[in-house]
Image (cartoon, grey):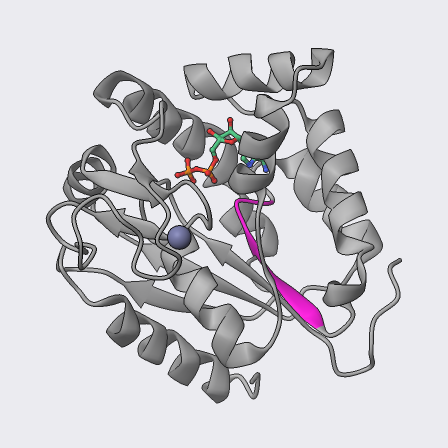
Amino acid sequence: MIQQEMCATNLIIFGPPGSGKGTYASRLQLKLGIPAIAMGDIFREISKEETGLGQRVKEYMEKGDLVPDDIVIEVLKERLAKDDCRSGFILDGYPRTMEQARALGEIVEIDAIIRLLVPEWIIVERLSTRRICKKCGEVYNLRYLKPKKQGICNKCGGNLYQRTDDTAKVIKERLKVYEKQTQPLLKYYEGTVPSIEFKCEKIDIPPEAAVKEILNGLEALSIQ
Ligand code: ADP
Ligand code: ZN
């Protein structure tokens, strides 16, 4: 178990790659006052390290495969033990396997799951035109969520880049992995953890509108 305040709010944002998890989580953290923890970002940092671990993580990520559970669980535990998680957190990109879900359940109680439902054509279209800030990780899209100045982050002025795993071939692999290993987790949580659902039907829905709907859903669960 980790040390948290009595009224801590622990959330999971759940959905396929490209469903908007990171985009919404980064905005929800400001509204809810709890940190968004993006496992993908943590592993992208680790993959840059010139260590055996960095090299291994990089290989998995480049193929669109999952990093092995023992590594992921270790990294998660370290992250959740940090001070900023005392009043809660929003997990983005964790858990992705049954083993990860079980490990999480042993250290903390989850208050709600935010489920994102997005049709596959939107995912593929979004991921192939996605750009990310090198400095702060903010997510943009060349067509649907353009930065004010081309190639530059609105928030911090950093340069935008395309993730090496945002290519047609790797996107397909990531979607396959999601369906096989991660999607079934919804069943695992069903009936035990309250959840809200956000259905995305339009590719250009403004993040603020989505976040508003999610916040309404959380409020209905008496979370906020
Ligand atoms: P997306 O959700 O768009 O696929 P992420 O940025 O969340 O992207 O993750 C990128 C990659 O990082 C994954 O394809 C995987 O290799 C690795 N990764 C992130 N989170 C996990 C996790 N919980 N378990 C295993 N691998 C992970
Ligand atoms: Zn930035």
From the top left corner, tell me how far across and down residue 87 is, in percent: 73, 74
Q: Position of residue 76 (x, y in %)?
A: 72, 43
* Predominant SS of the magenta segment: strand
Residue 67 in sight here: no
**What is the span of residues highlighted in magenta in the rendered image?**
88-94
Q: Is residue 191 left or right of residue 179?
A: right
The number of discs equals: 0
Residue at 13% from the left image edge and 59% from the top image edge: 204
Q: Is residue 114 above or below residue 6?
A: above
Is residue 195 found left or right of 77 in the rendered image? left
From the viewer's perspective, is 54 left or right of 172? right
Q: Is residue 71 magenta?
A: no
Give me the residue at 35% from left, 30% from top: 163
Residue 66 pos. (x, y %): 54, 25
Q: Position of residue 56 (x, y in %)?
A: 63, 13
Q: Residue furthest front?
A: 157
Quadrant where the C terminus is found in the figure? bottom right
Of the pair 49 and 207, the residue shown nearer to us: 49
Residue drawn 32% across and 78% down? Answer: 213
Quarter holding the N terminus?
Answer: bottom right
Residue 115 vs residue 130, the one in the foreground: 130
Report which quarter residue 2 is drawn in: bottom right
